[in-house]
Amino acid sequence: MQLYCDSLTEYKRLATLEVKVGDLIIGNFNPVRIQTMTTTDTLDTAATVAQTIRCIEAGAELVRITAPSKKEADNLQVIKNELRKQGYTTPLVADIHFTPNAAEIAARIVEKVRVNPGNYVDKKKFEQIDYTDSEYLEEIDRIRERFSPLVKICKEYGTAMRIGTNHGSLSDRIMSRYGDTPMGMVESAMEFLRIAEDLQYRNIVLSMKASNPQVMVQAYRLLVQTMQQELGHCYPLHLGVTEAGDGEDGRIKSAIGIGTLLEDGVGDTIRVSLTEDPEFELPVCKDIVKRYTNRNDYTAIPPVTNIPYSPFEYKRRENAPVENIGDKQVPVVVADFSDNKALLPSDLTAIGYVYDEPSDKWNIGDAAADYIYTGTQLPSFGLPGTLRVVIDAEYWQSIANKQELVPYFDARHYVTACEQNEIGRINFVQFDCNHLDTEHHEQLLLQLANPAVAASTVLVARATGSNAMAAIRRLFILLLNKNIRVPVIIHSISNQPSADEHLIHHATEAGALLLDGFGDGLWLSNLEPQPGQHATLNNIAFGILQATRTRISKTEYISCPSCGRTLFDLQETTARIRAVTHHLKGVKIAIMGCIVNGPGEMADADFGYVGSGVGKITLYRGKEIVKRGLNSDVAVNELINLIRENGMWVEKN
């Protein structure tokens, strides 16, 4: 199978063409560039200039500004002149939706234009049309006629272009033939790219954005493969998870989607789309990119030659369950309390268990850990029945009443314990993936060929260093090739200097594996303990599982990052909707600032809250309009009523 990257075990940047955006070079092994997008009204020159400057000073190497019509496109010249007058030379990008005329104006002014192939020529009507081959070719000719003038202007003015496909805004033509799929996203971009290639224009960056990181990652991988096979070269890639949301969830989702690709050297510029002021996106971008600048702790991993799974589609690795771990069961979460000297009932509040002393009962949350690792101590109080204790194997062997406890072995100790039949009915076994080929690891794999041993074994895959994810992935590939079907818990270990970087580390390394169907549980640890880290790590673990769609424990919000088209205060509205709906486990709610992004970018949301005019809201059920033109002061209550009417509302406890 042809890969989407040079190696699955050694970090190498994907070779791409070089694209000039003003004086900035993207691709061709240049540094991964970071960018953002303004949220001001483009016709408000002073506000847009001021926000652009804040973004530049926060680290943006490109700044995108919306140009939904000709008047905004014309005003880009005024904005650019004022920025240059104040000494700022950062390249500007015009964001175009629906309006070729605006794009053609902007391409003469700014250094780069972004067009969406799903709506640049096509007006999406959500119609299913069975195109004959000749009718399909006629549609392509229509695109060529409308798109070619922009290409020629870009060539004349030295303007770069981003062909930016979005999962939720594919044309009816693409949807009719390919469906709402990663391959449909790729073909949507390729239709435009082929036209540009025919016109000998290559100053192009491509993107494949989706609010679902799984769809996004598969689309980028397929795009690379398609370009390599059809063109013989790759264009630079702009990475981003669209409508990621805000706060911790938005950062986790972005890190999973962007980081999964950067881990394999795929990606040349990134934007983290948060429902926050744009300057707050840049520190997250920096934290993500920093992981790939100095890899001094890189450990060489033997290359993988036989890939027994498809990286272009999701399929969970099949295995035989060990109690509540593995097979088709949701991934478990392990909380690490080995740093606690004496465990108290109140400590478990951090991982989803609240003890009510008057009733002597535990209240269990949706995001409650399944296992707790305590090292060499035992809790002195009765635990909730859904929580199992994991302790070090040597300590476990010294305890008389060990039936309900789970021993944690290292590989060498476990091989000996198996031979002497001194193991539990469920055993956690540490597998150091940095040293996969050592003798005791090979002996362990031989032991796991024994069905009796495998039936009680859960591997805990861990690695450290800058290529830890690749090292753990190699273990999963080895297990697949050897048909060893034991469950595996991913143990992500962070040695980062800050809480923000811990989050990026865990989301990237664990998320990348989960997106490929690897992993039956998560165990997150920080080498340097931080105050309150038990609650933080538990939230991150469940956030990673939610973002990878492997375990749903809360409401999911698909919230756009706001821009000059936004028709209401997006941050305030998102907070209001979250406050009244956060208890609706598994419900997906899209909060979109305008009708441009609304029906398309909501993708697979259950309900949509979309700006359709100043102070006006349109509500969607899926992609179906349910109520139009609601006043914003009643729209949140109407959203609740809509959720209730569809049988998805539950009252708060």
Image: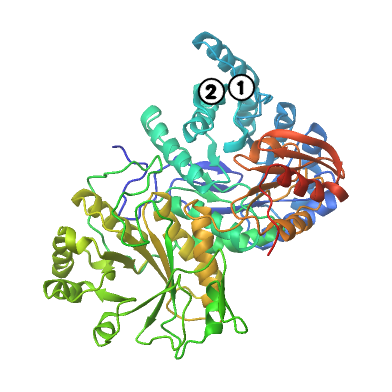
Residue 24 coordinates in the image, percent (x, y): 57, 49
Displayed quadrant of residue 232 = top left
- Going by the numbered disc 1, the residue's amino acid type is Ser
Which residue is most to the front? 359
Which residue is most to the left? 419
Q: Give the SS element for disc 2.
A: helix
In front of the other: 155 or 8: 8
Q: In the image, which disc is placed on residue 148?
A: 1
In front of the other: 611 or 259: 611
Query: Counting other residues with Cα less than 10 Å from the Cα at mark 1, is it few (<14), some (14-19), or many (20 or more)?
Result: some
Residue annotated with mark 2? 195
**Image marks 2 and 1: residues in contact by CB distance under 8 Å:** yes
Q: Is residue 610 left or right of residue 488?
A: right
* Quadrant the N terminus occupies: top left
Q: Is residue 493 left or right of residue 158?
A: left
Which residue corresponds to the image point at 80% horizontal and 36% vertical from the top-left? Answer: 627
